[in-house]
């Protein structure tokens, strides 16, 4: 299978730098803002109770809170039955561990139900969607951390 070449378009030139934008082939779905623009966080030892991390209400059926390390992010995601996470993709590798409830994922033309106590690994750039089949609590691990979540630019969830 041939790989499609990405087209690079020069957007802005200045005396000190050139900014470029890379366009994706039309069949690639990707989220803006998934690349951290600042320097990586300094690695440090922290002990954080989940109860001390405020839950961000994204919509009436979806909430989350997360902790960010130097190279990974751990998110605790709270989904009410019927919550839909629309199809999206990101350059981040994702591991989802369902603690309570069940999620039905749509990935690569397949439906995969992940129940409490089960894990799903999602490779980078793989389009996926999810539906909560019951009230669900899951842990999502991302490498690298999701800059769009940190910067609150993840409009597909809001």
Image: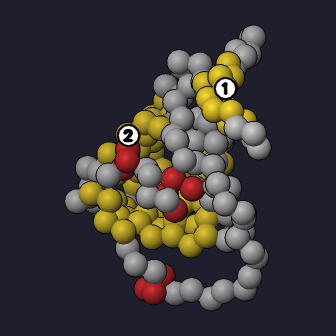
Helix, strand or loop at mark 2: strand
Between 75 and 133, the one nearer to me in the picture: 75
User: How far apart, in angstroms, are the residues tagged by discs 1 and 2?
Assistant: 31 Å
Q: Is residue 28 above or below residue 18?
A: above
Colour setting? secondary structure
Q: Mark 1 points at which residue?
A: 10
Residue 17: image quadrant is top right
9 sits to left or right of 2: left
Q: Foreground mark, 1 or 2?
A: 1
- The residue at 75%/39% (across/down) is 15
- The residue at 56%/25% (across/down) is 28
> In the rendered image, is residue 137 in sight?
no
Q: Is residue 155 above or below residue 9?
A: below
Q: Position of residue 84 (x, y in %)?
A: 32, 45
What label does residue 86 carry, if any? 2
73 sits to left or right of 71: left
Q: Position of residue 43 (x, y in %)?
A: 76, 76
Q: Is residue 42 above or below residue 16?
A: below
Q: How crowded is mark 1: few (under 14 residues within 10 Å), some or many (20 or more)?
A: few
* Total count of labels: 2
Helix, strand or loop at mark 1: strand
Q: How crowded is mark 2: few (under 14 residues within 10 Å), some or many (20 or more)?
A: some
Is the N terminus in the top left, top right, bottom left or bottom right quadrant? top right
> In the rendered image, is residue 105 in sight?
yes
Residue 126: image quadrant is top right
Between 97 and 152, the one nearer to me in the picture: 152
Q: Where is residue 104 in the image (x, y as percent from the top left)?
A: 41, 44
N-term-proximal mark, 1 vs 2: 1
Between 43 and 12, the one nearer to me in the picture: 12
- The residue at 74%/82% (across/down) is 44
């Amino acid at each position: 299978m041939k790989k499609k070449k990405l087209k690079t378009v020069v957007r802005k030139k200045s005396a000190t730098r050139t900014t470029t934008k890379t366009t994706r082939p039309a069949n690639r779905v990707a989220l803006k803002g998934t690349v951290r623009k600042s320097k990586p966080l300094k690695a440090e030892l922290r002990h954080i109770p989940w109860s001390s991390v405020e839950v961000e209400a994204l919509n009436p059926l979806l909430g989350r809170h997360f902790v960010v390390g130097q190279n990974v992010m751990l998110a605790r995601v709270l989904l009410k039955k019927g919550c839909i996470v629309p199809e999206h993709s990101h350059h981040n590798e994702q591991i989802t561990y369902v603690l309570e409830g069940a999620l039905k994922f749509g990935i690569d033309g397949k439906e995969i139900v992940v129940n409490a106590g089960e894990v799903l690994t999602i490779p980078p750039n793989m389009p996926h969607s999810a539906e909560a089949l019951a009230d669900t609590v899951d842990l999502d691990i991302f490498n690298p951390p999701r800059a769009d979540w940190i910067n609150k630019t993840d409009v597909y969830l809001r």
